Amino acid sequence: MGFYKKYSEFLSEYFDGKVQKIVVNGGFGCPNRDGSVGTGGCTYCNNEGFSPSYCHPATLSIRSQLEKGIEFFGYKYPAMNYLAYFQTFTNTYAPVDVLRERYDEALAVEKVMGLVISTRPDCLGDDVLELLHEYAEKTFVMLELGVESMRNETLRRINRGHTVEQSEAAVRRAASCGIHVGVHTILGLPGEVYEDFIHQADILSQWPIETVKLHQLQIVKSTRMAHDFEQHPDDFVRFTPESYADVAVDFIEHLRKDIAIERFTSQMPPEMLATEGWGIKNHEFLHILERKWKMHQDRKQNIQ
């Protein structure tokens, strides 16, 4: 293991050979959009920036989406196996019989070895957890919970519609059901500073999670957050790749060592951003991160 546990290392504990997630749009909605929890969604939200072109349930079934993804990856890696990654919107937000139907459709596709389900902490009723526990007894099941921040003030400002306490309760309930649990968090949300970013790692280390996905805040055009940024620019930390790598190094140092980090950054299409993007690829950021880590270790040795 390097200076942090990689997601591939986590997957190797459960699978032989390469395993790739394939994003699936299951056609689910969001309670923070339809009025059940709130309206308008999270202030930063734009799912289109994170979804591959084949994720269009109006024209493609779940099976077809997965088969197109497998065709894409299988050309280069014919021995690859796959996880159906229900990513778009809230993928436990439906009656249990609907969830079962859509998850079963994914698992029926050849070479699909399990489910990764992205959802909200407030969309895990007992009936949903019972269903996921049933699947987890037979196959690999992982929940990715969008917790986003460890400050309730921030969650209110971004119209997230749930609390830190709900996030923790959801993580603990899911883990107690034998379901693998990962979380997603954003660094750079309005009103937050360096100490808040690092505090997230301290808190998450106390939760029974196995993976974490983090990325820098990206402000998307025509969102409410873009308007918030226009009105209150001083409330936002403007990361460069170098400054963000410094924060990521400290985040790693505070995170429990057995928690795998799936990603550090996300890159939206430049034309969708309200602010200037970084213009680098993810592997280029990882080179910066590795350099920063080595510098950090050298400084620690010099102090000693």
Image (cartoon, rainbow, N blue to C red):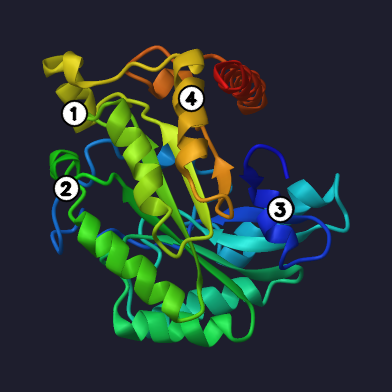
User: What is the CA distance from the residue labelled 2 to the residue labelled 3?
Assistant: 33 Å
Bin the neighbour count of mark 2 within 10 Å (Cα to Cα): few under 14, some 14-19, many 20 and up: some
Which label belongs to residue 164? none
Kindly check if marks 2 and 1 are in contact, taking CB atoms under 8 A apart as contact.
no
Kindly check if marks 4 and 1 are in contact, taking CB atoms under 8 A apart as contact.
no
User: What is the CA distance from the residue labelled 4 to the residue labelled 3?
Assistant: 29 Å
Q: In the rendered view, would you say 293 is above or below 152?
A: above
- Between disc 4 and disc 3, whose residue precedes? 3
- Residue 44 position, x and y percent, is 28, 35
- Front residue of 24/299: it is 299
Which label belongs to residue 152? 2
- Between disc 2 and disc 3, whose residue precedes? 3
User: What is the CA distance from the residue labelled 4 to the residue labelled 1?
Assistant: 25 Å
Residue with the mark numbered 1: 191
SS label for mark 2: helix
Instruction: Please tell me which residue is depicted at 37% across the width and 71% down the height of the picture.
Output: 172
Which label belongs to residue 269? 4
What amino acid is labelled 4 in the image? Answer: Pro
Numbered circles on residues, count: 4
Q: In the rendered view, would you say 137 is above or below 32?
A: below
Which label belongs to residue 9? 3
